[in-house]
């Protein structure tokens, strides 16, 4: 491969894939991938790879340079987001300084960071230091990878992925809300992987009362990747005997209730280790989802995986808050009346090419997964 542009795209694709490994584990920071290369007689070779570590530090660039050591001198840094240029309250030197001190001669960055503390300053400082800077390589892929970070620093809320499973005839549940086993085991494992790649999983109290779920990651070796469990519970109906409450000291549970919800059940939940937060009500008498998401953003959450059921999914989409939608369709038939998985409002939005773009369709364990990404 001799085309410089093709070389840059190939290494940036590697950096994006590497950074994706820690999605869901680095909040409040984005999971940034970084690759350091240097020229050899056979062409550029990878010296080190880095990614933002659990808890948000060290950043991807710092991690890569620590691995590269002196071998980074004269090389190229590929990074999926503009290197930070400010010192945070948590200490440590910014990634711009790490980059300058490393001795690399060139930086290839996928995108500017819209964080107002950075916003082009990182790239400008690198150029001032005499480093060649190329910006915009695989920017579309990087924008999607870092969408949670972008939304949090520009709109104050995390990105939301809404997932719904349905039977071949379109139902998410049986008549009266009877739970259904819709997805195949392989498809279920994919859902657990998505949980691991998000900071929080969000569910409505109706689904909790019907299913008594755990909402953890139950893949081999990944128990520590279980996200924060967020329950939308207007009137604080979450039972103290539920599996969520019983395990709240092992995997955090945050309940978002209405400002008018009673105090007594809150005390019982807090005593069990649940954190209760309150927001206002929307015009329909249910929780204000926009306010709830801003509250999560203020707590550092950047990526939310919503398995909240058909009503919540439709409300999120109608409010412009469902950034990605995943609909999985099983080959199983319900064969009778039930709860429609994709309600009319959501169906109309997904069918509008100006609002949602079909990202991919694939089979997982016999279930068809359709993935939609909100434009803009």
Image (tube, grey):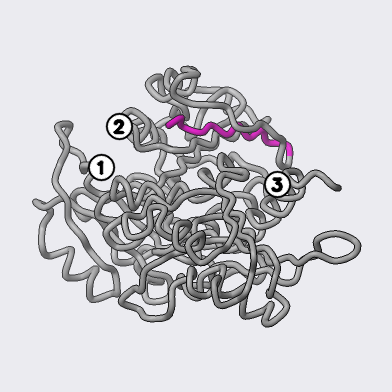
Mark 1: which secondary structure? helix
Residue 225: image quadrant is bottom right
190 or 235: nearer the viewer: 190
For the point 71% across and 41% down, the residue is: 364
Q: Position of residue 308 (x, y in %)?
A: 40, 43
Quadrant in the picture for residue 35: bottom right
- Using a 10 Å C-alpha cutoff, classify the residue at mark 1 as few (fewer than 14 neighbours), some (14 to 19) or many (20 or more): some
Which tag, 3 or 1, sits closer to the chain's start? 3
Residue 21 placement: quadrant: bottom right
Q: Secondary structure at mark 3?
A: helix
How far, Cα to Cα, is label 2 from label 3? Answer: 36 Å
Say whether marks 2 and 3 touch (CB < 8 Å): no
Per the image, the residue denoted by label 1 is: 290
Q: Which mark is residue 9?
A: 3
Q: Residue 68 location, x and y as percent?
A: 69, 77
Q: Is residue 160 at least partly visible in the picture?
A: yes
**What range of the chain is rendered magenta?**
366-376
Residue that label 2 marks: 319
Camera-nearest residue between 282 and 98 = 98
Tag 1–tag 2 contact (CB < 8 Å)? yes
237 sits to left or right of 335: left
Sequence-wise first label, 1 or 2: 1
Pinpoint residue 25: horizontal percent, then vertical percent.
50, 66
Q: Residue at x 22, y 46 (%)?
A: 291
**Which quarter of the figure is the C terminus placed in?**
top left
């Amino acid at each position: 491969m001799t085309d410089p542009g093709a070389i840059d795209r190939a290494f940036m694709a590697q950096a994006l894939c590497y950074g994706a490994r820690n999605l869901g584990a680095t909040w409040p920071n984005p999971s940034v991938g970084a690759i350091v290369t240097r020229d050899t007689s056979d062409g550029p070779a990878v010296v080190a790879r880095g990614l933002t570590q659990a808890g948000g530090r060290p950043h991807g660039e710092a991690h890569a340079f620590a691995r590269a050591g002196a071998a980074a001198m004269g090389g190229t840094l590929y990074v999926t987001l503009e290197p930070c240029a400010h010192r945070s309250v948590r200490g440590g030197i910014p990634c711009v300084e790490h980059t300058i001190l490393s001795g690399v001669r060139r930086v290839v960055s996928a995108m500017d960071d819209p964080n107002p503390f950075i916003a082009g300053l990182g790239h400008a400082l690198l150029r001032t230091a005499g480093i060649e800077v190329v910006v915009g390589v695989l920017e579309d892929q990087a924008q999607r990878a870092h969408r949670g970070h972008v939304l949090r620093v520009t709109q104050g809320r995390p990105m939301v992925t809404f997932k719904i499973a349905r039977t071949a005839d379109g139902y998410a549940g049986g008549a009266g809300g009877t739970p259904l086993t819709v997805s195949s085991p392989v498809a279920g494992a994919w859902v657990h992987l998505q949980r691991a790649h998000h900071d929080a999983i969000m569910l409505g109290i109706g689904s909790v009362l019907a299913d008594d779920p755990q909402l953890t990651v139950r893949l081999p070796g990944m128990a520590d990747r279980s996200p924060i469990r967020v329950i939308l519970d207007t009137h604080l109906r979450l039972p103290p005997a539920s599996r969520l409450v019983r395990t709240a000291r092992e995997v955090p549970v945050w309940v978002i209730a209405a400002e008018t919800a009673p105090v007594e059940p809150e005390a019982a939940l807090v005593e069990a280790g649940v954190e209760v937060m309150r927001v206002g009500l929307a015009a329909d008498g249910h929780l204000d989802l926009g306010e709830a998401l801003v509250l999560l953003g203020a707590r550092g959450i950047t990526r939310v995986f919503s398995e909240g059921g058909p009503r919540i999914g439709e409300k999120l989409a109608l409010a412009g808050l469902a950034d990605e939608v995943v609909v999985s369709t099983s080959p199983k038939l319900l064969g009778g009346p039930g709860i429609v998985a994709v309600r009319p409002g959501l169906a109309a939005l997904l069918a509008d090419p100006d609002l949602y773009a079909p990202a991919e369709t694939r089979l997982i364990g016999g279930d068809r997964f359709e993935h939609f990404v909100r434009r803009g």
